[in-house]
Image: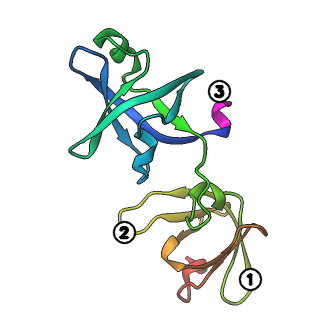
Amino acid sequence: MVMHNNDLLLVGHVRKAHGLKGEVVVRLTTNRDERVAKGARLVVGDEELIVMSSRPKDTDFLVFFDGVTTRERAEELRGSELRSEPLDDPDELWVHELIGATVIDQDGVDRGEVAFVQSNPASDLLVLDSEILVPIVFVVQIDAADGVVHVDVPDGLFEL
């Protein structure tokens, strides 16, 4: 069963074909290598692809998908987004769980909702609906059940 793309998380991209037998180069956008483990199910558009094998190559992975057996078929996947269902790991902080959460500062003031999370080399940033940026390193507690993120930020951050 293929879920609708809006129910799935972006986990990687097909960069290019590799060789003549259907192998592709995949760049993950997640630190979870099991996304390309044998048997993993990934979605491209309305098509579900099953990983038959994969191996690391530099910062990418070389992946064989079931049914992709020619270079021509692999080339058709070039540039495709790879999506998958969220993983169930209660010990992890998942970016998609932060979207829509209310941000409360150390003084108990509601600072708005998380519109999205922006990748940043120093620290990922919570982008609030007010367009204020809050480095994720200032998050001190997440109450996922209540949809609340508690932050302890330096004085003046919300006045910028």
Residue 24, percent across and down? Answer: 31, 26
**Quadrant showing the C terminus:** bottom right
Q: Residues within 10 Å of mark 3 (few under 14, many from 20)?
A: some
Write the residue at 55% across / 89% down: 155
Query: In terms of sequence position, does the residue under pointer 3 or pointer 1 come before the other?
Result: 3
Write the residue at 71% across / 64% down: 101
Write the residue at 48% across / 76% down: 137
Mark 3 and mark 1 residues within 8 Å of each other at the beta carbon? no
Q: Which residues are magenta?
A: 1-6
Residue labelled with disc 2: 122
Query: In terms of sequence position, does the residue under pointer 1 or pointer 2 come before the other?
Result: 1
Residue labelled with disc 1: 109
Magenta run includes residue 2: yes
Residue labelled with disc 3: 2
Query: In terms of sequence position, does the residue under pointer 3 or pointer 2 come before the other?
Result: 3
Q: Residues within 10 Å of mark 2 (few under 14, many from 20)?
A: few
**Cα distance between the residues tagged 1 and 2:** 26 Å
